[in-house]
Image (spheres, rainbow, N blue to C red):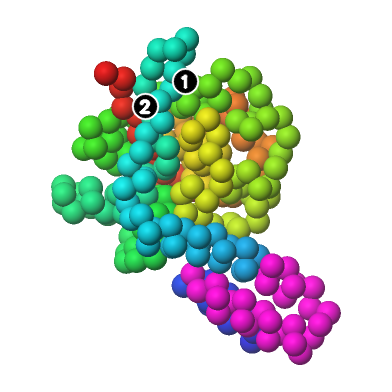
Amino acid sequence: TYYKLMDLSVKIDDYESAARYARLLLEKSHDAAEAKERLKFYLAYDALLAKGRERWKKSGPAPYEETAPVEENGITLFHIDRYEVTNAQYKAFLDSTGRLPPLRWGDISGAENLPVANVSWYDALVYCGWAGKRLPTEEEWVKAGWRDSASVYPWGGAIDSGKANTAIAGFGKNAPVGSYEAHNGVYDIIGNVMEWTASGKELKVRRGGSFETDPKHIQRASRWLKAPDEADEFTGFRCLKAAK
């Protein structure tokens, strides 16, 4: 019964209740190894959500409009969104254009600064145009994340569960954008959601892996192809603005 209550709580993103049920189970059975692991997970993920909610409460959507300049030899090549496009930003777009919302779109209260997902390449393309920007090519996307480094990951050559929201982080869900430290001024270039790029012909290129991707498979050259009219819970995007 307690496990079922935990699962139901997670379905509605109520990790505080899920943690409470895990503790109740542990009070009755101290050898419940699964309950211990679940409690650890619930507390860690709830901490990320709480951090995101507090940041949103203090600063609202403004910080997520920020871009990072990408330079080469002292010349600015372009500016890229520091964060993946959020639910709140995408809602502003929907409200302005009347475009149909993503699959399973609902009330985003409390999830404003989670990355928008379930958006097709066409959705991403139109949003970036509406915002006065465009999708980055995959070469630009790599340049933004790695700059001139040839390392496997933006932070170096070793896998690190604390650097990005990937499969080894263990959450199995998106986290608020910016929950992990920035690399080269850009957040979540690895993990959270895969990101559409402008590259590809019949199939479009996605980069960066998602919350369910093993980081062993998210390297500088890793890429995933998908039809531009398809969408899923693992895919979002960020935009790029040309240098003036």
Q: Which residue is mark 2?
A: 79
Question: Image height check: is 52 above or below 239?
Answer: below
Left or right, 141 with respect to 160, comes to left
Q: Nearer the viewer, mark 2 or mark 1?
A: 2
Q: Is residue 20 magenta?
A: yes
Q: Tell me which secondary structure the magenta stretch mostly adopts.
A: helix
Q: Quadrant of residue 81?
A: top left
Look at mark 1 in the image and give the residue it sits on.
Answer: 139
Question: Is 7 situated above or below 128?
Answer: below
State the residue in front, 79 or 114. Answer: 79
Which numbered disc flags the more N-terminal residue, 2 or 1?
2
Q: In this view of the protein, can residue 157 be seen by the observer? A: yes
Q: CA distance from mark 2 to mark 1?
A: 14 Å
- 181 left or right of 195? right
Asked if the magenta segment contains residue 75, the reply would be no
Q: Where, quadrant-wise, is the C terminus in this rendering?
A: top left
Image quadrant where residue 129 sits: top left
Q: Amino acid at mark 2?
A: His
Range covered by the magenta-colored residues: 13-40
Residue 111, image x and y in percent?
A: 40, 61
Q: In the image shown, does 81 or 106 lie closer to the viewer? A: 81
Would residue 38 appear left or right of 184 to someone viewing this image? right
Residue drawn at 83 percent across, 79 percent down? 31
Amino acid carrying label 1: it is Glu
Where in the figure is residue 32, as x and y percent of width and height? 79, 78
Asked whether 6 or 229 is in front, the reply is 6
Q: Quadrant of the N terminus?
A: bottom right
Q: Is residue 194 above or below residue 201?
A: below
